[in-house]
Image: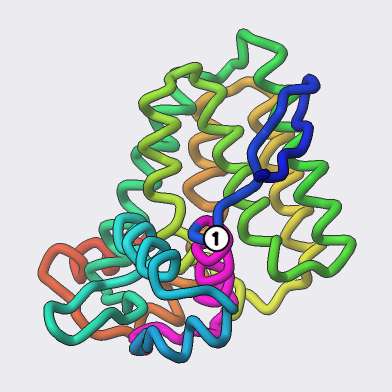
Amino acid sequence: MTAVHTGTGGRIVAPPSMAELATDALRAMIFSGELALGERLVEARLTERLGVSRPPLREALQTLTHEGLVVAHPRRGATVRTLTRHDVYEIVTLREDLEALAVRLGVPVRVPERLERCRAALAAFEEVGRAGDESRFLHHKVEFHLSLVALAGHSRLTEAYRALSFQMQLCMAMNRTARRESLLENVERHRELLAVVEAGDPEVAQRALTEHGHTSFLLDLVDRLDGGTPESEEWLARRRGA
């Protein structure tokens, strides 16, 4: 009989499937750099490495392809997605526009329970930072940003942000390398961001979000990437000028 465990509120929750476990493991390997950007994903090696059979592994690769972390090549298998300068342009501009809409709709905060979720997300983020848990750090960082977006009370906006979040984490992983800050220093920047949001001025909150996360990445690591376009180069020039 399949084991179950008790979730929040006493509800019976089925344990994750082998495909879900494989998806989580592969995602963590990508974000940590254990699987490099552009690396070919050889099924035989991955089944041995993860201890799963090919069907759940293939299901996991399909999920990661849908999330934008893996690219499937007809008759040539799959690779970890690489980032181009144009990719960064699309990811960052879409992220900023979604966050701007969330601030416009959600600040000042009118539902205290939503703000409590932000505080709880920050506390969980700080906990993994104090534990030095690099493997879970990016996940909790994104969960904190999702809690900020959820202040808008707009479920479709939150889901759009969640769908983008996996590709955002590729940028964040590279950005953390460029920033050279400790996990707790990163947490403190987010604590300051939440304080600005709590203060309730949407213009100040929007400015804080825009300036919060991308500067070192845009001015350093992005220059190591290929694949620029007229749109991405014009955008980068504007950001550098600002």
Q: Nearer the viewer, residue 51 or 98?
A: 51
Identify the residue at image location x=34%, y=89%: 40
- 197, above or below 131, in the image: above
Query: Could you tell me residue 103's position as x and y percent?
Result: 48, 27
The answer to if 84 sits in the magenta stretch is no
Residue highlighted by disc 1: 18
At a point 12% along the width and 78% down the height, the residue shown is 74
Q: Quadrant of the C terminus?
A: bottom left
Which x, y percent locates residue 134? 72, 70
Say whether residue 30 is magenta: yes
Please report the residue visible at 68 percent of the width from the left and 79 percent of the height from the top: 180
Label the magenta part by its dominant secondary structure.
helix
The quarter of the picture where the N terminus appears is top right
- Name the element at disc 1: helix
Instruction: Give the number of marks.
Output: 1
Picture quadrant where residue 114 is located: top right
Q: Nearer the viewer, residue 217 or 50?
A: 50
Which residue type does callout 1 highlight?
Met
What segment carries the magenta color?
A: 20-39
**Residue 59 is drawn in which quadrant?**
bottom left
Task: State whether residue 196 appears in this view.
Answer: yes
Mark 1 crowd level (few <14, some 14–19, many ≥20, 10 Å Cα): some
| Residue 165 point in image, percent of width and height | 45, 51
Identify whether 110 is placed above or below 169: above
Q: Is residue 42 above or below residue 191?
A: below
For the question of whether residue 174 can be seen, the reply is no
**In the rendered image, the vertical position of residue 213 relative to residue 31, given as above or below:** above
